[in-house]
Amino acid sequence: MRAVFGIDVSKASSEVAILVNGEKVHRYTIPFSRLLDDLKTVQTPEIIFEATGVYSRRLQAFLEENSYAYTRLNPLEAKKQLDSLQVRKTDKIDAEKLAQSQFILNRQPSYVQEEVYQELRDLSRFYRILTEDIVRTKNRLHKLLQISFPELKNLLSTPTNW
């Protein structure tokens, strides 16, 4: 028996579609308690979802905390793979198509990094954003000084002007 959980993660809610041997068994909007109960009923569930930034991180943390392997898809890759399978696009249909595509493509589970590396990546991103903000602020200050005091450029351009 092969059970695949396709999960479409969005800002407000997430849709779950459970397929067993290619046949749809359940489809519902996610409460994590029900998802955990359904995952416990299957020996080796295959869980697949699309990475949607901060929204999918909550699901990812939940699965890692409960020691479940999962396949996290790049959104562009998922779109390319699912375009041929669907006519309309809704969250419920996306969840089901993700699960169906797993039966066809047999994707491997995603590599789970240690938490310290995730924290380092987050800190690095935060540092980069702060650096960009500082540069942007300096550029604004420079522009305001040029507009407010245009003669300041002439005064500071030659080192002998005292």
Image (cartoon, helix red, strand yellow):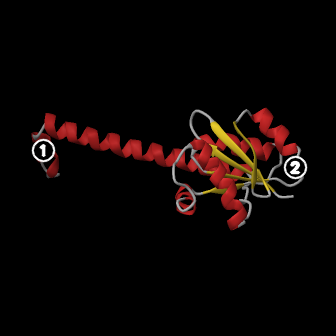
Q: Residues within 10 Å of mark 2 (few under 14, many from 20)?
A: some
Image vertical order of residue 62 relative to residue 45, above or below: above
Q: Quadrant of the C terminus?
A: top left
Q: What residue sits 58% from the left and 43% below the top?
A: 91
Q: Position of residue 142 (x, y in %)?
A: 24, 42
Which quadrant of the view contains residue 74?
A: bottom right
Q: Position of residue 93 (x, y in %)?
A: 60, 47
Identify the secondary structure beneath mark 2.
Answer: loop
Q: What residue sits 56% from the left and 50% below the top?
A: 124
Residue bearing mark 1: 155
In the picture, the disc for residue 2 is none
Identify the secondary structure beneath mark 1.
Answer: helix
Q: Residues within 10 Å of mark 1 (few under 14, many from 20)?
A: few
Q: What residue sits 57% from the left and 47% below the top?
A: 52
Amino acid at dot 1: Leu
Farthest residue, direction bottom: 105
In the picture, the disc for residue 42 is 2
Q: Give the mark nearer the N terminus: 2 vs 1.
A: 2
Comparing 19 with 141, the one in front is 19
Inspect this view and state whether residue 107 appears: no
Q: Quadrant of the N terminus?
A: bottom right
Inspect this view and state whether residue 67 appears: yes
Which quadrant of the view contains residue 56?
A: top right
Q: What residue sits 53% from the left and 44% below the top?
A: 126
Horizontal side of 100 relative to 131 (left or right) equals right
Comparing 22 with 16, the one in front is 22
Amino acid at dot 2: Val
